[in-house]
Amino acid sequence: MDTAFSIRNKKLSSQQIIYFQEFFMERRVDELGRVVIPNHIRKALGLEPKTKVKFDVSGKSVIVSKAYPTCIICGCEKDLTEVKGKYVCADCKKQLI
Ligand SMILES: [Zn+2]
């Protein structure tokens, strides 16, 4: 934890630091490019360990959202059949047969 954290040169207690970090939801990217998603956000979005997420870039922002399986051919999310860990929708499946 960053012990030099202060507001207007006023030193904060550890609990105050945790509160402000949670409130502002700021996290640091570590040396390997990892960022921890705050626990209350993971719980709200149902992001259990091993859940697949996807990243979308919008301007200077990164949007992290839960990834859902999509058809490997057309990208749709309906009527999927899993084949060796990949998904194919009913329409594309018809065209393959
Ligand atoms: Zn498809």
Image (cartoon, helix red, strand yellow):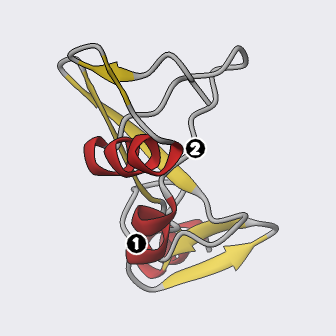
Residue 77 appears left or right of 71: left
Residue depth check, mark 2 versus mark 1: number of the one nearer the observer: 2
- Residue 93, percent across and down? 54, 74
Would you name the residue on which mark 2 appears?
36
In the rendered image, is residue 70 in sight?
no
In depth, the one of 90 and 25 nearer the eye is 25
Would you name the residue on which mark 1 appears?
45
In the rendered image, is residue 60 in sight?
yes
Give the structural element (helix, strand or loop) at label 2. Answer: loop
Q: As displayed, is residue 29 above or below residue 42?
A: above
Query: How many other residues sit within 10 Å of disc 1, few (<14), some (14-19) or many (≥20)?
Result: few
Q: Mark 2 vs mark 1: which is more N-terminal?
A: 2
Task: Name the residue furthest front.
Answer: 10
Where the C terminus falls, by quadrant? bottom right
Task: Name the residue furthest right.
Answer: 84
Tell me the kind of residue under disc 2.
Answer: Val
Q: Residue at the location (50% across, 78% down)? A: 94
Q: As displayed, is residue 64 above or below residue 86?
A: above
